[in-house]
Amino acid sequence: MKSENFGLDARFALALAIAEEAGKVALGYYENRESLIIETKRDPQDVVSIADREVENLIRAQVVATNPDDGFLGEEYGLLAGTSGYTWVVDPIDGTSPFVNGMPNWCVSVAVLRDGQPVIGVIVAPCHGEIYASALGKGATLNGTVLSLDPKRTIRNAVTGIGANSYVTPAFVGNMVEKLLDAGGNFIRNGSGALMLAYVAAGRLVGYYEPYMHAWDCMAGFCLVREAGGWFHPFPVEGDRLIKGAPVLAAAPGAIDDLRRIASL
Ligand code: IPD
Ligand code: CA
Ligand code: CA
Ligand code: CA
């Protein structure tokens, strides 16, 4: 339908523009990170700074000004319900730990949901000069080059990303690592789950697993992976499930069965 497409197209253009601008602002903070005051949230490994808050404020203000009926969920300031059927799901800085410790593996992640699905996913990695963009039915791109997953890549001839946080028992991650290595695979973690999902879409990783993430960590990455020809395990976002976490598994076609078996998903 024309109005629906216009709604998606307009929001896709906006998501790209906002994420790029947010990436520049975040990069400014990163380059002056010695002056940031680092605060802890749930535990000493869970950190935040004014950079996370200011970047979310910038994105939130632009969405509210341009699409006041849309919902908005951000990691730092929570959920503002909407009425349009579209909900923006934003992680202003994914990879805050690498960010504050001077490692370039962090990104700005902007997704838009409709009917419980991510219909827009944009991830900007400013230190790498990379912009990952996707929208429902329009494919996925990295700096304008179309992404299309190679079905010949499997857990045995490529690398799988695995993430961890203190929300769940270490056994989940330990078991996953052990089973993956047993099956002839290997793993990597760079500290930004959203960026690792973008790497799945780009064919750099063959899959990504983390036992518990929030919607703001994974929705943009899921859209990218699906549009590049990959798969993700259904992640519940209906009602109050939107602000709760769930297991994350995404994979290229040749790794889906192995990773589902190994992760028991
Ligand atoms: C975290 C990163 C990390 C993942 C955690 C996330 P944050 O997000 O994506 O790689 O393992 O589960 O919470 O806090 O840096 O936005
Ligand atoms: Ca965080
Ligand atoms: Ca995150
Ligand atoms: Ca974050």
Image (cartoon, grey):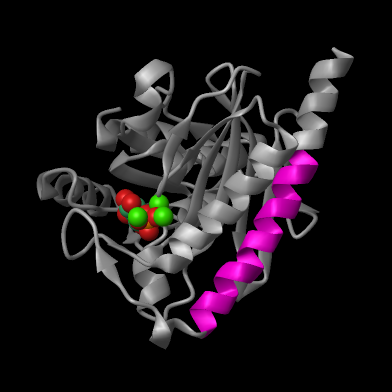
Q: Is residue 145 above or below residue 248?
A: below
Q: Which residues are magenta?
A: 12-31
Task: Determine which quarter of the picture holds residue 94.
Answer: bottom left
- Between 50 and 105, which is closer to the camera in this rendering? 50
Dominant SS type (magenta): helix
**Looking at the image, in which quadrant does ligand 2 appear?**
bottom left
Taking the spot 42% from the left edge, 45% from the top edge, the residue there is: 77
Q: Position of residue 178 (x, y in %)?
A: 18, 51
Residue 29 in sight:
yes
**Residue 42 appears left or right of 120:** left
Q: Position of residue 250 (x, y in %)?
A: 45, 39
Q: Position of residue 215 (x, y in %)?
A: 43, 36
Q: Position of residue 57 (x, y in %)?
A: 54, 53
Number of numbered discs: 0
Q: Is residue 23 magenta?
A: yes
Taking the spot 59% from the left edge, 39% from the top edge, the residue there is: 111
- Between 99 and 198, which is closer to the camera in this rendering? 99
**Residue 116 appears left or right of 261:** right
Which residue ends up furthest to the right in the rendered image?
2
Residue 148 in sight:
no
- Between 59 and 118, which is closer to the camera in this rendering? 59
- Between 133 and 249, which is closer to the camera in this rendering? 133
**Residue 185 appears left or right of 1:** left
